Amino acid sequence: MRVTGRGSSGRAAGTRLLLLPAIIAAAFAGAARADDVQGKLGYCKDCHGVAAQGYRGYFPIPRLAGQQSEYLENQLRAFIEHRRTNNIMFNVAHTLKPSMVAALAADFQALNPPPIGGAPKERVAEGRRIFQDGVPDANIAACAACHGPDATGRGEIPRLAGQLYPYLIKELVNWGHERGQNPSRPDTSAIMSPVAHSLNKSQIEAVAAYVSYLK
Amino acid sequence: MLKIAGIEFGGGAPLNRRAKRACVNRAGAPWLLLAAVLAGMPTDSARAEDAPATPKDVQAKLTYCEVCHGVSAQGFHGYYPIPRLAGQQTEYLQNQLQAFAEKRRTNNIMLNVSHVLSPAMVAGLAADFKSLDPKPLGGGPKDLVDAGKKIFNEGVPSVNVPPCAGCHGPDAKGNGPFPRLAGQLYDYVASKLTNWDKERGQNPQKPDTSAIMEPIAHNLTQPQIKAVAAYLSYLE
């Protein structure tokens, strides 16, 4: 017998009662079902944009489209463990089963909408230079070494291409206050810590402008 | 300018006494002699200015290097495999930074990194990296390790591949201009050996020590390269 989720409203109450143990079992043990994943994906997109291209809510809400699945999974875990501080995402993340996280991450990585854009275009050339070459005199590493020449990221290193301009600025400015917040459990955010610290506000704006237009 | 077998050598770097002895002791292998002669040539001074580097400056620069090369310089998988520098030979590190700065070794990121470094800073960094000894990242296919060990220690005489241990040492720790390979990243070693002549020795007017490895990299097959790289990736 196939366990159905949505669209089963016509069934007799007795049948539903019989199905309940199976539903509970599926929820706790089985892989996330396609319907459930679609439902959850719709929920994520309420805030992250209909194609996960990012959205300017009260806060800048990051683009997840095309994001590296390993990075997404790491961040969701970081929210749960309070290593990355964000009350909304803590509540979102701690209800997600590992199989759901894996399915969502795969779906987000497959999306490829055009970037939202909107950053000051006159800063793009300078941002490109910092991204590709770094600022060796100021001990700022080239972003491209880890994030790739097209800012697509790899594995645990996030894609930055098309990311929202105000989101990038907020993250880089507040890095030390938002990431790696459990000193007894250091995570990959430590890699960016000295870089974020060394960049000045103007350099942050330039890099954010550059990557926000990348497809 | 020195000319051997139709190749002119103007670059290169001084070789320490132990390395020289190691080469001369294996007089049967002409390419090793070539290495000794080549490496014995005086170093060209590429950087005019030599500002002093305070310990604080060196520490800040080291932190910057370790953003990409790993917190203990054990190497890191960024977008590219970024090599382990921990325990590396200081002379090799200095040679490579100079090669990046002079575009004999092509790498845009490292060109930008290297060309702002004063000789004093390079010396400070190289000494610090040499003193580090973190565990290898590992990650090479374990089933290739035995085959790799055999190639490393014995070479592949039938195709004129000499034992790697001849120059890099039985423990792959390197010596002077010969780099340490122990604990180096699997995919980094594989990609360097595969692309040797596209990345190294890119100024025909200024041949350098990379010429020594060129025929060896050329003669190794892909399976042999992977085997050697797997073996090295686990060596402490």
Image (cartoon, coloured by chain):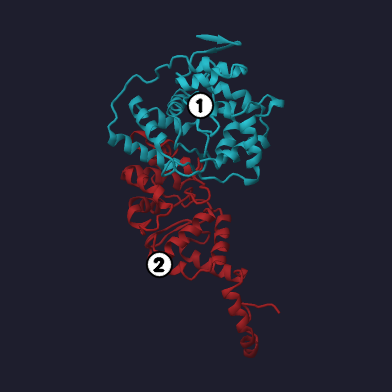
Neighbourhood count class around disc 1 (C-alpha, 10 Å): few under 14, some 14–19, many 20 upward = many
Residue at x-position 48% and y-position 49%: A157
* Residue B116 seen from this side: no
Looking at the rendered structure, the secondary structure element under dot 1 is loop
Looking at the rendered structure, the secondary structure element under dot 2 is helix
- Position in image of residue B114 (x %, y %): 41, 29
Rendered colour, chain B? cyan
- Chain red in the figure, letter: A
| Amino acid on which disc 1 is placed | Phe
**What chain does mark 1 sit on?**
B
Give the answer, above or below, for where B78 lies relative to A32.
Answer: above
Residue at x-position 33% and y-position 26%: B120
Query: A10 and B222: which one is in front?
Result: B222
Q: Mark 1 highlights which residue?
A: B178
Mark 1 vs mark 2: in front:
1
Give the answer, above or below, for where A68 lies relative to B64.
Answer: below
Give the answer, above or below, for where B46 lies relative to A102.
Answer: above
Give the answer, above or below, for where A32 lies relative to B211.
Answer: below
Q: CA distance from mark 1 to mark 2?
A: 54 Å
- Position in image of residue A186 (x %, y %): 40, 55
Left or right side of B147 for A154: left
Residue at x-position 47% and y-position 62%: A76
Q: How many marks?
A: 2
Q: Mark 2 highlights which residue?
A: A88
